[in-house]
Image: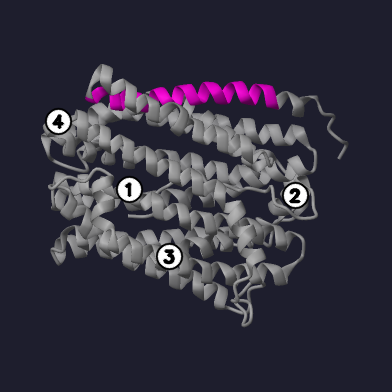
């Protein structure tokens, strides 16, 4: 199982001597490969740029989400429905761990890309060294605390006597490997930001390949069950850590480890954490949402509570596999939008935004039709338990009702990130979870029972999308009214 997913965040509003627009321009430039110049972002075809930047990100994001799918398929068929429910229960714990990992990774990668754009390479090297040490310290502390309070945490997050043993067996191993995963994610983000997007993509593919190869061997061959799935994930994280560490240990790369740059500096740590607070709170709220959902499923599912939690875990894997495509598109859009915003080429900025919405909406709408036409076929891949299949089908068909508008909401949130409107981005992201979804999960089951939990999810998406539409209409007029300077 890979890290829990959330929309990637670039927060360019940094306290330094340069303007936000300048930072965005430099960040967009620094995200390029060595064969891509600044001028291309401002002149080349928008569609070509979107494809060039999005495809590696889509591959990487989709590969990461395959972790969850592979684990659930193997565990569901080898161990049983309660094991799937146990895996679903660890998701908020994984989100919690990812919140800290994303805080360091997103903050460090943004800082590195900007410092490289400013030609301040020594400072970028210092950020790299501080990221490694910071991830070891935070990851190690979380491992110790997690192992001590694991049972209490899992029970708090909805574990029952039937599902607790499976969740515990999985998380014990994941927590031990947590330091490796934190460093892999952080260094891989810096690798992408320092001009190696394709190599960062191959990092993700490597971890998926190791996981897919080892999971069936450990689960079926050695009969290690859910611990086998966790061990396969741990070895995958180890391979990823070795890969990115080897990259930055190579002195041939312009940004690499250097002696004397591993000493923690309060200014660097402060910059990293201040930028990383945005994804931290998003992961934290995502964890809270899953806890509320699991609690509601256990309360309103009755004797089927554990099966309902497992069904939600299956559906979440399917949904995230589709949404990873949109997240990849968003990552490809960010440097294109950011650069042209900084260059005040509003027509190109808006074209990139509109085209990304169109592609994202096609992706999510296709997922909507597939889920409605073939729900039983999709969920049956994960389990052969009739009760869990029936619950999963109902959940899947309900959750995807909002998919035709979800693409628009996700792209718009990322658009605000890319142009430096971090406050709007955070507000729109959290509004879906905290303002609409959690109240819906509390209210709707009182009216509809278990089905109310499923209904609350697309309802939250529809309301969040409506709010997003209102915000973007009011904001986008500002950019359409500004004159575009001649090239």
Residue 364 placement, left or right of 482: left
Residue 337 falls in image quadrant: top right
State the separation of the CA atoms marked 2 and 3. 33 Å
The residue nearer to you, when weighing 211 against 412, is 412
Image quadrant where residue 437 sits: top left
Residue 139 - label: 3
Q: Which mark is first along the chain, 1 or 3?
A: 1
Q: Residue at x 47, y 28 (%)?
A: 435
Q: Is residue 153 left or right of residue 59?
A: left
Asked if one can make out residue 213 in the rendered structure from this viewpoint, the answer is: no
Question: Image point 40% across, 55% down: which residue?
Answer: 97
First in sequence: mark 4 vs mark 1: 1
Question: Disc 4 and disc 1: Cα gap in Å?
Answer: 22 Å
Q: Residue at x 59, y 62 (%)?
A: 196
Give SS at disc 2: helix
- Residue 257: % across, % down: 59, 76
CB of mark 3 within 8 Å of CB of mark 1?
no
In front: label 3 or label 1:
3
The quarter of the picture where the N terminus appears is bottom left
Q: Is residue 25 visible?
A: yes
- List the residue tagged with mark 1: 91
Q: Residues within 10 Å of mark 3 (few under 14, many from 20)?
A: many
**Quick one: label 1, few (<14), some, or many (20+) residues within 10 Å?**
many
Single out the mark in the foreground, 1 or 2.
1
> In 3D space, how far apart are the residues under numbered discs 4 and 2 (Cα atoms)?
54 Å
Mark 3 lies on a secondary structure that is: helix
């Amino acid at each position: 199982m890979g890290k829990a997913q959330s929309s990637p965040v670039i927060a360019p509003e940094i306290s330094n001597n340069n303007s936000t627009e300048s930072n965005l321009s430099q960040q967009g430039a620094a995200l390029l490969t060595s064969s891509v110049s600044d001028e291309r972002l401002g002149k080349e075809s928008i569609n070509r740029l979107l494809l060039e930047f999005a495809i590696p990100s889509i591959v990487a994001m989709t590969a990461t989400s395959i972790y969850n799918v592979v684990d659930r398929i193997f565990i569901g068929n080898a161990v049983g429905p309660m094991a799937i429910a146990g895996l679903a229960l660890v998701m908020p714990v994984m989100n919690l761990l990812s919140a800290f990992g994303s805080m360091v990774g997103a903050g460090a990668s943004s800082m590195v890309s900007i410092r490289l754009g400013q030609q301040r390479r020594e400072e970028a090297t210092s950020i790299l060294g501080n990221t490694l040490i910071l991830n070891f310290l935070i990851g190690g502390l979380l491992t110790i605390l997690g192992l001590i309070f694991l049972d209490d945490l899992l029970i708090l997050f909805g574990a029952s006597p039937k599902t607790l043993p499976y969740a515990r067996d999985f998380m014990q191993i994941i927590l031990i490997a947590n330091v490796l995963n934190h460093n892999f994610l952080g260094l891989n983000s810096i690798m992408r930001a320092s001009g190696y997007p394709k190599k960062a993509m191959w990092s993700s593919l490597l971890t998926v390949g190791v996981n897919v190869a080892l999971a069936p061997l450990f689960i079926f061959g050695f009969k290690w069950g859910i611990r086998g799935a966790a061990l396969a994930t741990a070895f995958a994280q180890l391979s990823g850590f070795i890969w990115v560490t080897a990259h930055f240990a190579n002195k041939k790369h312009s940004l690499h480890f250097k002696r004397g740059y591993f000493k923690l500096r309060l200014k660097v740590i402060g910059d990293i954490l201040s930028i990383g607070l945005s994804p931290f709170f998003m992961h934290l709220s995502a964890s809270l949402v899953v806890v509320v959902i699991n609690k509601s499923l256990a309360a309103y599912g009755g004797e089927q509570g554990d099966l309902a939690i497992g069904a939600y875990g299956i559906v979440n894997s399917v949904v995230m596999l589709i949404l990873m495509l949109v997240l990849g598109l968003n990552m490809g859009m960010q440097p294109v939008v950011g650069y042209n915003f900084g260059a005040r080429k509003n027509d190109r900025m808006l074209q990139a935004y509109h085209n990304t919405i169109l592609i994202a909406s096609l992706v999510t709408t296709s997922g909507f039709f597939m889920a409605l036409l073939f729900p039983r076929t999709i969920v049956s891949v994960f389990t052969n338990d009739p009760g869990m299949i029936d619950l999963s089908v109902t959940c899947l068909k309900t959750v995807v009702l909002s998919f035709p508008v979800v693409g628009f909401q996700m792209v718009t949130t990322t658009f605000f990130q890319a142009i430096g409107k971090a406050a709007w981005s955070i507000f729109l992201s959290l509004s879906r979870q905290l303002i609409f979804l959690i109240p819906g999960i509390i209210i709707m089951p009182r009216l509809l029972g278990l089905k109310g939990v499923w209904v609350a999810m697309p309802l939250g998406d529809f309301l969040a999308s409506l709010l997003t539409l209102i915000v973007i209409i009011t904001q986008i007029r500002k950019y359409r009214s500004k004159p575009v300077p001649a090239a």
